[in-house]
Amino acid sequence: MSLFDNRPRLIHGALALFALAVIGRAAKVQLLDADRWRARARDQQVAAAPLPAPRGAIRDAGGAVLVESREMVRLRIAPREVRNRAQLGKLMARAGIGADWVARATDSTNKWVEVPGLFLPTDVAMITATRGVHPLPVLNRVVPPSEGLRRIIGRTADGGTPVDGVELALDALLRGTEGTETLLRDSKGRVFASPSMDGAAARPGHSVTLTINAGLQDIAERALNDAVQAQGAAGGDIVVLDVQSGEVRALASRRTDPRSTAATALTEPYEPGSTLKPFIAAWLLDHGRARVDEVVSGHNGRWDLNGRIIEDDHKAASFTFGDVLRYSSNIGIIQFAQRLTTREQYELMRDAGFGAPTGTTYPSESPGRLAPPSQWSQKTPASLAMGYEVLITPLQLATAYAAIANGGELLQPSLVKEIRTPDDKLMYRHSRRVVRRIMTPETARTMRTLLKGVTEGGTAAGAALATFDVAGKTGTAKVARNRHYVRGEYTASFVGMFPADEPQIVILVKLDSPRKSIYGGKAAAPVSKSVLEAAIAARDAALDRAGLAKSPQRVAAAPPADEPVRDVVESEVVVTESAGSVPYEVSLEPSPRAARVVAGPRTVPSVAGLSRRAAAHALHRAGFRVEFVRRDAAAQWPAAGAVAPAGSRVTVAVSP
C-alpha cells in the first residue's frame, strides 16, 4: 500500500494524538495545576486591600478620652477614568483642595494623582463616589488637646507609626492587628467590594488609662504657662505625685524652644540645689548623728572652707538644725554633712533614687547622674550637700519627697493606671510598689514638721495657704553649660507636700532661667500655691476631700484662758519681760502686714542672735507668747525646732 493510500490514516492518527494532547493538557490544567491557575485567576479578579487597625484609646484617670483613632480618607484619582472632570473639579474645590491639585486631578495626561492630606469621609463623600476616584481609608490619631499631654502621650507619624512618649513605649499593645478587605476587579480594571467574599476584620489595639487627672493637668499647665511668661523664663516643669500610690497626677512641661517635644520633667536632669538638703538632714536624724535642737555656727553668712568661700543669703551667727532648712543655709548643711563618710553620702542619695531611672512608662527617661565616690574631688561632698555635682530629673526629686510624705517609703512612680483589651477585659492595673525604705516613719514625721517651718516664715513663705499647712523646700541653683556655670542663669524650684501633716500629694515646680526673680521662694513657690488653690477649688482635681476635711485648718487661735494673745497687727504690742522680780514692758512698733495666727502645734523658731524686739516679733508671728528672763547664757525654752501648741509661752534668756 502506497504512502498516498495511508494519508487518511496518518491524518486520523495525528488528530487522535492532538486530541489526546489537548485532553491531557486540560487534565493537567484542571486536575494537577488547578490550584495554581485558580490563584492566578483570583489575583486578576480579586484584590485584597489592607484594613488598618484602630490604635487603642488613651484615657485619663477618670476615663475621659484623651487620644483616639479617627477614620480618614486619602484621595487617589485616575484622571483618564473620570467621565465628568469639570464636576470633579468643582467638588474638589468645594472640599478645600488647592487649585494646583484640582488641575492635576482633572488633567487626562496624568495617569494617577494622589492628593496630599487626609479628609473626613463625610467631607469628601461625593468625591469618593465619583468614577475614577479610588479612596484609601486611613486611621488618623487625634492630637491631644494640650501641650503637656502631647509631651506625655507622644506623637504618631503618618500611618500611625509612633514617634515618642507613651505611644512609643506601649506601641505593641496600642497598635492592634491589621485586617483585609476583599475587592473584585472587572474586565476594565474597575474595583468594587465583593458581595460574597469576606475579608479579615481588623482588631483594635488595647486601651490605656493614664494616672493623669485631666483637671489637675489643666490647672498645672495654665499655672506653668503663666509663670514662664511672668518670669520671662526659658521654660519649666510641674510634677504632681500621689504620695501613697506613686501615681503621677499631673506632668506639665514647657520650653520656649519649639524643638523641644518631650516631657522634660522625665528627660532633662538638672542640679537641684537646696531642695536636696532635706535628704542629708533626714539621714543624720535617722542615724542619730544630729538632733533637732542642735546648733552650728553660721559664720555670719561667709565661711572659708579650705579656700572655698561658702555664702548664705540669710546671714546669722548660728543656726539650729531646723533653721538650716528653714533659711536654706549652705554653711549649716555642709557642717552637718561633714558627719557622713563619702560612702554614706553616696549611698543615701542612691537610696533616694538619684542616678537611676524611676522605671516609669516613658521611652527616653533620663537616669540623671550621680558619680561614684571614686570620681569625687575634695569639693564634691560639700557640693553635694548644697545640691550640686548631681543631676536629677523633676520626677526623681518628686518621688524622693513622696517618701518623706508617706512615712519613708520610696515608691516606683507610674504613668499608666490600667490597660484593657478591645473587649474591655482588664489586662493590667497599677499597684503600689515599694522600692525601698529610706527613712523611718518617725524621721519622716519630723522632717515634715521641719519643712512646714520653711513655709511659715522661711524661704518658702510664698507657698503658704490661707487654710491648710504646706511643707516644702525651695532651691536656687546655678545653671551649668559646657562644664561651666553661666553668670546670671539660675534654676528656681520648690517641692511641697500638701497638706503638711498627712500629705496627699507632692508638687514640684521648676523654672529655668527666670528673669524677674531667680529665687525658688519668689519664683517657684507662688506657682505651687496657685496650683493648690485651684485644685482645692476644683470639683475633681485628684484630692481626697474627706481626708482634707480631717486635716488641721488655719483658723484664728483662741487666746489662753490666763492671758490673751495680742496679734502684731495692733497699733502696739506689749511684751512682758521679767528681770528677777522686777517686771517691765517693751513697746514694739506695729508689723507692716498681718501675721496669720493658726491653730494647732507648730515649730518654735530660733531667735538666736536677734535683738529683743526682733525676737519678740518673730515669736509673735509664729503664734507664740514670749517672756524674757535674765540669764548669763542666751537660750530659749522650748528649744528652736521643737513643736509646741499655738499660743504657748516661749521663754527667752538674755544677758543681764
Image (tube, rainbow, N blue to C red):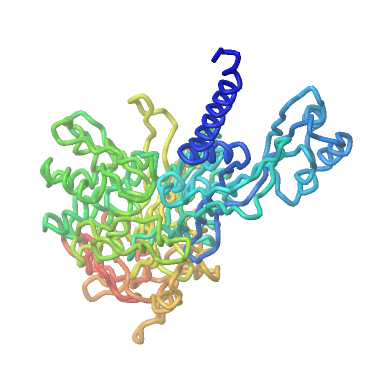
For residue 633, which quarter of the picture? bottom left
Q: Is residue 422 above or below residue 163?
A: below
Image quarter of residue 218? bottom right
* Front residue (pair 600, 562): 600
Identify the residue shown where x is 70% and y is 44%. 119
Q: Nearer the viewer, residue 125 or 602?
A: 125
Quadrant where the N terminus sits is top right
What residue is at 34 percent from the left and 71 percent from the top? 624
Q: Position of residue 220 (x, y in %)?
A: 51, 55
Q: Is residue 399 above or below residue 620?
A: above
Residue drawn at the location 50% of the way across and 66% of the way down? 62
Question: Which is more toward the observer, 247 or 304?
Answer: 247
Q: Residue furthest bottom?
A: 561
* Residue 462 shows in this picture: yes
Looking at the rendering, in which quadrant would you find the C terminus?
bottom left
**304 in relation to 484, above or below:** below
Left or right: where does residue 223 sit relative to residue 276?
right
Location of residue 173 in the rendering, given as x and y in whole percent from the top left corner: 42, 52
Q: Is residue 515 visible?
A: no
Left of 93 or right of it: where is 277? Answer: left
In this rendered view, identify the residue nearer to me: 40 or 224. Answer: 40
Image x and y of residue 325, in percent: 29, 53
Residue 437, position in %: x, y? 19, 59
Q: How many numbered callouts?
A: 0
